[in-house]
């Protein structure tokens, strides 16, 4: 099933697309910050109940993805990435709106996420109504060994 959000096509993905997800992560996440997952981590989480992958396309080209999960009535946005060449074209917003809609469809009452301190996506989350609820010190370890805090955000879906 696919849905158009603005000029972005959102479609369901699955384990068969882990190579695409890996390529999008390599483009979308700077290795200095240690935010990307491995293919095995993605495959492992996709095998769990309540986990789903959304692929975004613009002009027939892969533009980004989001990976989320739900347990009971709480959902978590695990990963979201947009190819640098596709940024500032509404892809991130479309993915986020799609995930929020999916969470509501799955009867989640709240959506959580964690994001590296200083990540430009924080503005997107705040515009969408997320509120900062905490900080995890030294959560990310970058390629040089430097550590970075994660900010925890939540969105009330009730």
Image (cartoon, grey):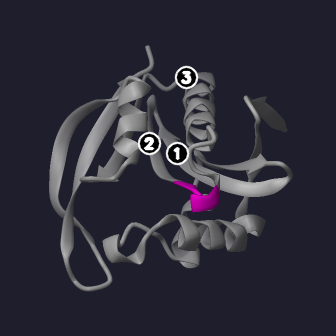
Mark 3 and mark 2: Cα distance apart in space: 13 Å
Q: Position of residue 127 (x, y in %)?
A: 40, 26
Marks 1,2: beta carbons within 8 A: yes
Pointer 1 residue: 69
Pointer 2 residue: 76
Furthest residue toward top:
158
Q: Position of residue 2 (x, y in %)?
A: 82, 38
User: Does label 3 or label 1 sit earlier along the sequence?
Assistant: 1
Query: 144 or 51: which is nearer to us?
Result: 144
Mark 1 and mark 2: Cα distance apart in space: 5 Å
Q: Is 16 included in the stretch rendered in magenta?
A: no
Dot 1: what SS? strand
Which label sits on residue 107? Answer: 3
Residue located 68% across and 69% down the image: 18
Observer able to see residue 73: yes
Looking at the rendered image, the quarter that the N terminus falls into is top right
User: Does label 3 or label 2 sit earlier along the sequence?
Assistant: 2
Dot 2: what SS? strand
Query: 72 or 91: which is nearer to us?
Result: 91
User: Does label 1 or label 2 sit earlier along the sequence?
Assistant: 1
Q: Quadrant of residue 50?
A: top right
Residue located 76% across and 35% down the image: 7
Q: 47 left or right of 76? A: right
* Other-residue count near label 3 (Cα within 10 Å), few / some / many at <14 / 14–19 / ≥20: some
Q: 126 left or right of 117? A: right
Query: 50 or 130: which is nearer to us?
Result: 130
């Amino acid at each position: 099933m696919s849905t158009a959000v603005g000029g972005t096509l959102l479609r369901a993905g699955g384990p068969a697309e882990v190579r695409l997800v890996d390529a999008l992560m390599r483009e979308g996440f700077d290795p200095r910050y240690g935010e990307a997952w491995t293919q095995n981590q993605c495959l492992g989480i996709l095998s769990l109940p309540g986990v789903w992958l959304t692929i975004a396309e613009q002009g027939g080209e892969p533009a980004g993805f989001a990976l989320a999960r739900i347990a009971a009535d709480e959902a978590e946005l695990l990963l979201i990435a947009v190819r640098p060449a596709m940024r500032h074209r509404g892809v991130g917003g479309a993915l986020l709106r799609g995930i929020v809609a999916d969470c509501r469809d799955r009867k989640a009452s709240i959506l959580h996420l964690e994001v590296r301190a200083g990540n430009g996506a924080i503005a997107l989350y705040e515009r969408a109504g997320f509120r900062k609820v905490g900080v995890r010190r030294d959560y990310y370890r970058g390629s040089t060994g430097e550590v970075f805090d994660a900010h925890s955000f939540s969105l009330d879906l009730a």
